[in-house]
């Protein structure tokens, strides 16, 4: 089971009270997002584009102290996440300027 931590607005959209745990096979970002969107269809299009399936520009993925946002989505998740020792975080990025 993979522990997934969503930002408040996505938890609210999916009507979740906290973190969630999903079985993910194979343990990749792509499979994790597929499982998440299958279980919570309301999240389709919120994290990645529904047609291209690419990550939304202001959404980032973190796990085991690393930014996984630019990694290939078919790359296996970090071992600590697969083992249940670390969570996979979906984070809303913030852009700023003057």
Image (cartoon, rainbow, N blue to C red):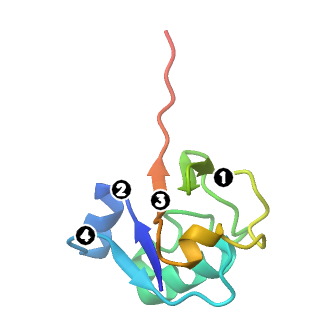
Q: Give the side of residue 1 with respect to residue 48, left or right.
A: left
Residues under labels 4 and 3: Cα distance?
A: 12 Å
Count the numbered circles shown.
4
Residues under labels 1 and 2: Cα distance?
A: 15 Å
The x, y position of residue 26, in whole percent, is 69, 87
Question: SS class of the residue under badge 4?
Answer: loop
- The disc at residue 69 is 1
The residue where tag 2 is placed is 7
Q: Considering only order in the chain, which callout, 3 or 2, is on the residue closer to the N terminus?
A: 2
- The disc at residue 48 is none
Residues under labels 2 and 3: Cα distance?
A: 8 Å
Question: SS class of the residue under badge 1?
Answer: loop
The residue where tag 4 is placed is 18
- Nearer the observer, disc 4 or disc 2? 4
Q: Considering only order in the chain, which callout, 3 or 1, is on the residue closer to the N terminus?
A: 1
From the viewer's side, name the closer residue of 46 and 35.
35
Question: SS class of the residue under badge 3?
Answer: strand
Specify the quadrant of the image occupied by residue 49.
Answer: bottom right
From the viewer's side, name the closer residue of 27 and 90.
27
Tell me, yes or no, whether the two marked residues, 2 and 3, touch with CB atoms within 8 Å: no
Tell me, yes or no, whether the two marked residues, 1 and 3, touch with CB atoms within 8 Å: no
Q: Give the side of residue 77 with respect to residue 93, left or right.
A: right
Q: Residues within 10 Å of mark 3 (few under 14, many from 20)?
A: some
């Amino acid at each position: 089971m993979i522990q997934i931590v969503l930002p408040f607005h996505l938890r609210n959209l999916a009507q979740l009270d906290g973190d969630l745990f999903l079985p993910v096979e194979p343990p990749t970002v792509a499979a994790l997002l597929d499982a998440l969107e299958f279980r919570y269809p309301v999240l389709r299009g919120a994290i990645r584009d529904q047609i291209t399936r690419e990550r939304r520009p202001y959404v980032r993925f973190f796990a085991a102290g690393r930014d996984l946002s630019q990694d290939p989505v078919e790359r296996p998740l970090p071992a600590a996440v697969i083992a249940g020792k670390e969570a996979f975080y979906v984070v809303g990025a913030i852009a700023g300027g003057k």
